[in-house]
Amino acid sequence: MSKLQIKDNPALERDLFNKAVINTSVSGYHNRLKQKTLQQEKDNEIEELKSDVQEIKSLLKELLGKK
């Protein structure tokens, strides 16, 4: 498998067989994994907050309906 260094970026190589661009930076890979994990945590927190708001709304409707 032949690879060619991409000009102006030592962490990137082009696979000459399938023309794919390959990131060879291990630290860049780990940074991306960390970024994905943080984004997933944020998404989970947002979903939890949405659920909490929905629960509060239903409790308020229940309280107001009983009066």
Image (cartoon, rainbow, N blue to C red):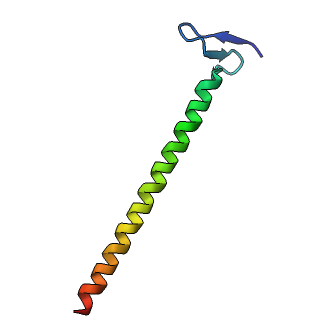
Tell me where residue 32 appears, x and y as whole percent. 56, 33
Q: Position of residue 23 (x, y in %)?
A: 62, 22
Residue placed at 41% from the left, 67% from the top?
A: 51
Q: Residue at x 60, y 16 (%)?
A: 11
Where residue 43 sits in the image (x, y, percent)?
46, 51
Note whether 36 is above or below 42 in the view shown.
above
- The quarter in which the C terminus is drawn is bottom left
Between 30 and 14, which is closer to the camera in this rendering? Answer: 30
| Above or below for 17 versus 46 | above
Residue 24: x and y in percent read 65, 20
Q: How many marks?
A: 0
For residue 44, side relative to residue 15 (left or right): left
Residue at left 26%, top 92%?
66
Q: State the residue lying farthest toward the left.
A: 67
Q: Quadrant of residue 49?
A: bottom left
Relative to 50, residue 15 above or below: above
Residue lying at the far bottom in this picture: please name it: 67
- Is residue 57 left or right of 10 when viewed as pictured? left
Please, which residue is most extreme toward the top here?
A: 7
**Relative to the observer, which residue lies in front, 2 or 28?**
28
Residue shown at 31% from the left, 74% from the top: 57
Residue 20 visible in the picture: no
Residue 14 to residue 39: above or below: above
